Amino acid sequence: MKKHIPNAITCANLFSGCIGIVYAFNGSLEIAAYFVLLSGVFDFFDGFVARLLNVKSAIGKELDSLADVVSFGFLPGVVMFQLLSKSDYSSPYLPYFGFMITVFSALRLAKFNIDTRQTEDFIGLNTPMNTLFIVSLPFIQKDYPALISAAPVLVGLVVLLSWLLVSEIKIFSLKFNSTSWAQNGMKYLFLILSVLLVAFLRFAAVPLILVLYIGLSVIHFKRVKTTSV
């Protein structure tokens, strides 16, 4: 029975993503964002529970990727589609460019499944963080409507995020093999700073958190490389 628990949690991730997509297509982007957060919680705990129960399966790995394509691939693509639809450039075709996020998310997940270098950490931006950034945009739009409604800005973000998803930038995972500060100091620093940013800025903190995540990852792996040499 216990071998099915992680897969059930993964299915909850998928189900939550499907609901979020419905809200996104209906224009309720902020509600969709909360379902992304719920999917993220399920995505974290399916792996955590699998390790805790010591149950791993080939179907679990494939199911996890398929769920992520929906929750962290299709859903952010729909959000970007909606944002481009309401941008300051009136074109019936431009909004479909938002689904490049979905395409590159699928490519990123496929690469992850076959890349033996990504057993501990990531190479390229992980899809949950990318999705979190995208669903934060409708919240930021409240304070900066002209910026988030500008088509060049949105198109530029699609291009940048698509590149980051399949880039060779090494990014640390937030999985902890121990509680040691010496081994996880950069991760602890990232989490502490992220909590502080969210406390003060809420969803508007997400772009800063993304920059922080990539920046600290670059510093971390430069230190690791220097130490190993």
Image (cartoon, rainbow, N blue to C red):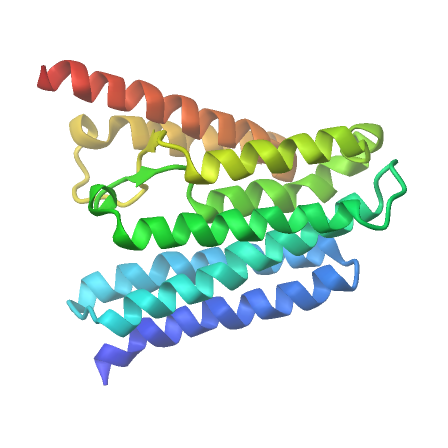
Note whether 92 is above or below 227 in the view shown: below
Task: Give the x, y percent position of residue 128.
Answer: 47, 49
Note whether 12 is above or below 94 in the view shown: below
> Looking at the image, which residue sits at the far left?
229
User: Do we see residue 165 in this rendering?
Assistant: yes
The quadrant of the picture occupied by the N terminus is bottom left
Pick the front one: 103 or 146: 103
Note whether 204 is above or below 175 in the view shown: above
**In the image, is 167 to the left or to the right of 229?**
right
Give me the residue at 49% from left, 50% from top: 105
Pick the front one: 96 or 147: 96
Task: Give the x, y percent position of residue 116.
Answer: 20, 47
User: Do we see residue 199 in this rendering?
Assistant: no
Pick the front one: 180 or 22: 22
Task: Indicate the quadrant where residue 3 lies.
Answer: bottom left
Give me the residue at 46% from left, 40% from top: 165
**In the image, is 158 to the left or to the right of 223?**
right
Task: Give the x, y percent position of residue 80.
Answer: 69, 47
> Looking at the image, which residue sits at the far front?
93
Task: Give the x, y percent position of residue 196.
Answer: 50, 30
The quadrant of the picture occupied by the C terminus is top left
